[in-house]
Amino acid sequence: MTKIKKIIIALLIVLIIVASILITILLINLNKGEKYMPISEDEGIDAYEKELDTTVNQVTNRIDYYTVKDCLGKYYSYYSILLNPEMYYTGVSEEDLSQAEQDNAQTLYNILDNEYITERGITVDNLETNLKDIGIITPYISNMYVNHRTDNMDIYVVEGKIRTGIQDAGEDFRIILKLDLLNKTFSILPSEYVEEKYGNIKEEQDLNITVEDSITKNNNNQYSYRTISEENYIKELFTQLKNELLYDKESAYEHLNEEYRTKRFATLDEFNSFVTSKEEEYKAMALAQYEVIQEDGYTQYVLVDQNGKYYIINETSVMKYTTMLDSYTVDLPQFIEKYNESTDAEKAGLNMQKIVDALNNGDYNYIYSKLDDTFKANNFGSVESFEEYIQNNLYSSVNVEYSNYKSSGELHMYDVTFTNKDNQNNEPVTKTFIIKLLEGTDFVMSFNV
């Protein structure tokens, strides 16, 4: 071997050794103090810094939320299969069914947390007898909290209902789920165990729980990060709102914006009566368009269905929100801004549009509240008599055209022509509306009876 060849080989060996040392140092640093979600840039996810403590707080990151949701779905899917094998296995021999049950028990066992396994003496053989007997279920999440306990371990508290279908009232659940961010593994503490040992866990509460350094990987406890597009997320918000209005009215009522609820519905019974009257409309409602507006401290989603009805969702964290079922009962910030920049004639028109929206929504209380007191006293002694007049003289669902605007001092007059949105063959009805602007965005009105 020539001297030059020996030198080249020696240099190559040195380069290989140096490269190995650099890679080792890099891996050590990554495993030591990484405070960012280990998600690659090509997944389109921005890493974010986490503050480590012992308290639980609302989940504000959609990637976290949907990753945990997927893990929870796996758990309850395995749970359902284990307890209801006859629903999943038909036409198989007893031997095959017995083997399938054993395999399913092992699968569920593989995602249970060591704390639960140790304290309850859980084995693959006795697992089924330690589980509450439930049917084929799907979890619906109402709250999700996170505790960033260590650099590579996150603890989640997930609350909601498990249901056999969207129309089922369901049973409450509260589980604790641990995510190992480095191994991409998870484990679960079941609801009954969490209720007994940890009770009602509230936001910003300290979570006194043992946390391991890592969760050992097996065939069933691995996860991957899940992204969701803005459009699909908004569709999911809309679907959840729709399902609550149809099948979970109490939750829909609780989700109402407090100011809106006070102004619009005096009681839960009044709300239930209104929503029940709209049942067929809600069954058919579909998202037609939306707008996303960033406000101070929350994100506002203005959703419009195929009939032009507005639904407002104000979100403070992932799937944590309040709702309004129209855009006129409580003035939106963008409406106030537009209103303040408008001429008096335009303000009158904006207020008239509120009346039209309320008419299409069957909200006679709102329209009645905007009638001039003298006009109201002379023509409609009660909201019931006003509703009867509207039903006999106008249409329940209308398109409108404005014409012949005039003003006289504080009064603004429009001729408004109403046509039946449901049947274009009906005769148009024209009424002259007189609108008086009051302080702020308030107003009163009257019309020719």
Image: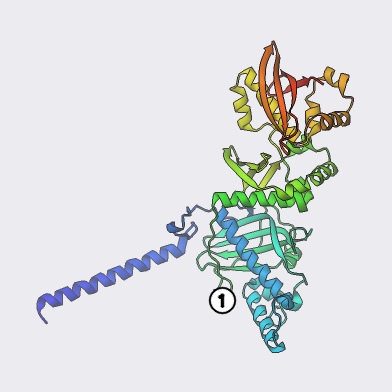
Q: Is residue 122 above or below residue 173?
A: below
| Direction top: furthest residue | 409
Q: Mark 1: few, some, or many residues within 10 Å (few <14, many ≥20)? A: few
Colour mode?
rainbow
> Total of numbered circles in the picture?
1
| Direction front: furthest residue | 425
Residue 355 locus on image (x, y percent): 73, 29
- Residue 402 located left or right of residue 182: right
Residue 428 visible in image: yes
Q: Residue at x 71, y 49 (%)?
A: 284
Residue 265 locus on image (x, y percent): 80, 38
Q: Indicate the secondary structure of the residue bearing disc 1.
A: loop
Q: Is residue 227 above or below residue 285?
A: below
Quarter holding the C terminus? top right
Residue 423 locus on image (x, y percent): 73, 38
Q: Residue at x 19, y 75 (%)?
A: 10
Residue 298 locus on image (x, y percent): 61, 41
Observer-nearest of 218 and 365 = 365
Q: Is residue 360 above or below residue 43?
A: above
The three-letter code of the residue at mark 1 reads Asn
Q: Quadrant of residue 76?
A: bottom right
Quarter holding the N terminus? bottom left
Observer-nearest of 191 and 340 = 340
Q: Residue at x 61, y 53 (%)?
A: 59
- Residue marked by disc 1: 219
Q: Quadrant of residue 150?
A: bottom right
